[in-house]
Image (spheres, rainbow, N blue to C red):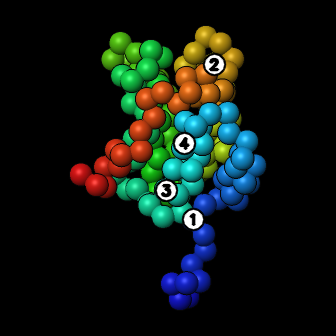
Amino acid sequence: MEIDELPPCTPPDDVNLFNQIRGNYQSDNEKRFFEELEYKEENEASFAYDWLLESEENEDGIYLYRVGNSEYAVNRIVGGKYGDEWHFDSLAEILNINLKEKGYLNRSITLWQWLRERDYAGIRYDRDGDWD
């Protein structure tokens, strides 16, 4: 297989997500979130974790990172205690998890709804461990 024949890195679920959200953003921060992650999935594999949100950057103690091209993980740290870390194969999957069902919050809300409520506060795009 020649290099120009390599399959795309972005999973079909995320291709659909990026296409559906394009032009339907609720804020400039949401637009940046999806545009940055689409670019990263297509162009920047991360092997040392791309920390999008750290637990000390929000009152709920939730962290979110990307690894590889399109795998994501989420967890919660409160009072130095870790919850169960959950891993997903796409952004589409992780955004739709229910944070109450995962034991992170006392109310039923998806990760995507939670990020929207915060207008993506604390999300950063410059903490890929591969760059250190």
* Residue indicated by mark 2: 100
Which residue is painted at 31% across and 55% down in the image? 130
Q: Secondary structure at mark 3?
A: helix
Which amino acid, mark 4?
Phe
Mark 4 = which residue? Answer: 33
From the image, tell me which residue sits under label 1: 9
Q: Are discs 2 and 4 less than 8 Å apart at CB?
A: no
Q: Is residue 109 shown above or below 14?
A: above
Q: Circle 2 — which element?
A: loop
| Residue 35 horizontal/vertical position (percent) | 57, 50
Estimate the x, y position of residue 93 in percent, counting from the top left: 66, 43
Q: As rendered, which of 34 and 56 lies closer to the eye?
A: 34
Mark 3 and mark 4: Cα distance apart in space: 11 Å
At mark 4, the secondary structure is: helix
Q: Amino acid at mark 3?
A: Lys
Q: Amino acid at mark 2?
A: Lys
